[in-house]
Image (cartoon, coloured by chain):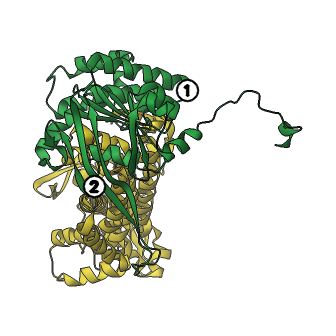
Amino acid sequence: MKEVLKRLKRRNKLAYFSLVALLFLYLIAIFADFIAPYPYDLQNREFSYCPPTRIHFREINGGFHLRPFVYKYHLKDPVSRKYEEDKSEVYFIRLFLRGTKHKLFGVIPSRDYLFGVGAPATLYLFGADLYGRDTFSRILQGARVSLSIGIIGVSISFFLGLLIGGISGYFGGKLDTFLMRMAELMMVFPGFYLMLALRATFPTTLSSVQVYLMIVIILSLIGWASLARVIRGMVLSLREEDYVLAAKAIGASNLRLIVRHILPNTLSYTITAATLSIPGYILGESALSLLGLGIQEPQSSWGNMLAAAIGNLQVISHFPWVLIPGLFIFISVMAFNFLGDGLRDVFDPKTW
Amino acid sequence: MAKETIVKVENLKKYYSVRPQEIFSKVGQEIIKAVDDVSFEIRKGEILGLVGESGCGKTTLGKLLLKLIEPDEGRVYYQEKNFLSLPAKKLRRMRRELQIIFQDPYKSLNPRMRIAEIVSEPLIVHHLWKNKERERVKELLKLVGLPAGSMDNFPHQFSGGERQRINIARALATNPEFVICDEAVSSLDVSISAQILNLLRELQRKFSLTYLFISHDLSVVGYFCDRVMVMEKGKIVEVEKTEKLYQNPSHSYTRTLFSSIPKIKKNLPLEKGHGQEN
């Protein structure tokens, strides 16, 4: 594993950088409650569509501070929702402060935040949404949903794909025919409509956790088929390889043949394909959310935040920061693609 | 020289049906008789050659003997037992006695495993040399003339001849009695192939091994084997002692085969301008 990283760093800087960026995003997602300055569902109607808070070092009268500070915002024009800084008092950005009650990892009650400003000033790094909720905090919270859906979904569908493809290719015969026709049945339907149809089979009144699990299951059920077919083909040809026959001649068991000789040689493909298909899950969740079938408010995901923004063109032109979740989708999807590309090169032992 | 029989093959058959061109039609379905009712015996300690043109079923026969592909019919007796109809567990246990060395040294080693893992796999599978696998691997590598330091390298770091040595080391790991050399030297260049042949012969004498030596190269077979079987389109047409066969081939196919060996004739008349035409 260490070697793989080293090689990735040496051979493909972009992929390595993507990996670092993704690890950073995941780390942030895990500690979202603590890092975000506000609870994701904390509303502050007074600051509806408040722009990103400007961070200052120099006061209006020329006084310079090493610590960054903000001014309190107040609504100047309620019609066009223009805000103005009230420059009479500075509010320093503080580390490790106590604020509104929230739950760490959804269970541990806590009041601790990594950073923030004291009331009545507000710190909206990426602005606020219609209900005056902090976009930055919601993005961090939404990262949990959007980023984990990819990993969990890919795990499930690759488990299914490897299992079904492996069995199909190794044992062949009628079982192979049956399993592959099933896979083709899944592939016959256009993915997006299948997703909608599957979604329709679940009741609409579900808790957010249930909705989340349901989306993961839907996306994995769609994803396994194409992988199973590729794995089946690879196993089918690997099964006839001389080194597999040699291991068979040695007396190795079926399990050993599959686990030691056949599957490891599909690994470079599998890992690359897994990495490259994670964006599909992230986008799938976004698409469902965009149609209002994904994660429900007040839970946030990058998809449903974007959905809330995209409803109204006026909103986008006046308050462009509502599109920032899209930037995060873009970054993570690109990063997974670069990483997948880099891994493809690195996993070939001939390049070691 | 009535040596005891080590492997006895009876009525071995393997047919392949080639699919017809049209999907729903049975017309035009062709059956290829890769191995067609083959019976023969291999005697303990001998090197039995198997020759024939490419596509005549030599390799299929070799793989059938070890049940690497399922035969349609037939029996292979080893130690009085029909190897082919053994229950799976006993079959796997029996496999340590019968080994194979493949033709292509680039395909017969798992590219993701280190040499030590490859050579020690038979030991691990059969629970032999427990906890001393590495010492055994060292010993085997020395036996086939490879440095012990190459244990932790990957197959792609070796040349064709070296890889074939690794294959031999793996095949000999469990001290088998009978080894099939399936075109074991065909893909190597002449000097390397001579080295490997000498190694095989040396090992054969040292461990009193029995070889089935599959090859299309008649001169190699003539040099290396005690007896030679000639195969044509899935059937064995002639089995004879090497010298006898080479001096006096009785079957017409054998004669045809032998006439295909390129010979340099002396006093070949040179035609005018012959060399410049091409």
| Tint applied to chain A in the drawing | yellow
Up the image or down, B252 lies above or below B119; here it is below
Residue at (23, 40) in percent of width and height: B8
Q: Is residue A113 visible?
A: yes
Kindly identify the amino acid type of the residue bearing the numbered disc 2: Pro
Could you say which quadrant of the image residue A163 lies in?
bottom left
| Tint applied to chain B in the drawing | green
Kindly identify the amino acid type of the residue bearing the numbered disc 1: Val
| Cα–Cα span, label 2 and label 1 | 75 Å
* x and y, in percent, of residue A118 in the image: 27, 53
* x and y, in percent, of residue B161 in the image: 47, 26
Could you say which quadrant of the image residue B117 lies in?
top left
- Say if labels 2 and 1 share a chain: no
Residue that numbered label 2 is attached to: A37
Up the image or down, B152 lies above or below B89; here it is above
**Judging from the image, what secondary structure is the residue with disc 1 in?**
helix
Could you say which quadrant of the image residue A252 lies in?
top left
